[in-house]
Amino acid sequence: MRDPFTAGLLSFIIPGVGQLYNGRILAGILWLIITPGFWIGSGGTLGWICHIVAAYTAYSYAKDHPIRT
């Protein structure tokens, strides 16, 4: 079973880890690569937005797909 709270928390701490927890390997790798680029490129503003979006997508995926297949 996937826990939405755990997925969201993991992805908020390190964007992409929540997606990896959900089994979405490609999405996790993309978040791990894209977020630092936004942190550096925007001086932090877009980095926070990426953190929130990554956490929300990990949470919502785990909520919609609670059972691992």
Image (cartoon, helix red, strand yellow):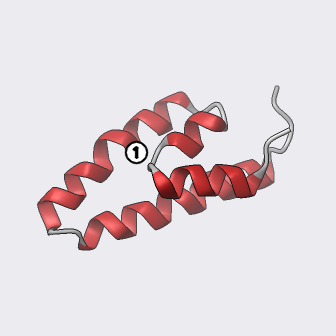
Image height of 24 relative to 49, above or below: above
Percent x, y of residue 19? 57, 41
Q: Quadrant of the N terminus?
A: top right
| Quarter of the figure with residue 51 | bottom left
Quarter of the rendering containing residue 50: bottom left
Q: Position of residue 40 (x, y in %)?
A: 15, 57
Please identify the residue farthest to the bottom as the structure is shown. 45
Please give the count of numbered marks on the rendered protein.
1
Q: Is residue 51 left or right of residue 25?
A: left
Residue 57: name its quadrant: bottom right
Residue farthest along the top direction in this orientation = 69
Give the position of the C terminus as an image quadrant: top right
Answer left or right for 22 relative to 57: right
Residue at (15% x, 69% y) in the render: 43
Give the percent coordinates (x, y) of residue 58.
Answer: 61, 51
Image coordinates for residue 39, horizontal then vertical, percent = 22, 60
Above or below, 60 against 31 in this view is: below
Q: Secondary structure at mark 1?
A: helix
Taking depth in this image into account, of 39 and 66 the one nearest to the observer is 39
At 28% across and 68% down in the image, what residue appears?
46
Q: Residue at 78% across / 55% down in the picture?
A: 63
Label 1: how many residues lie within 10 Å, few (<14), some (14-19) or many (20+)? Answer: many
**Relative to 51, is 24 on the left or the right?**
right
Please name the amino acid that badge 1 sits on: Trp
Q: Which residue is mark 1?
A: 31
Q: Residue at x 38, y 39 (%)?
A: 30
Q: Is residue 69 left or right of residue 32?
A: right
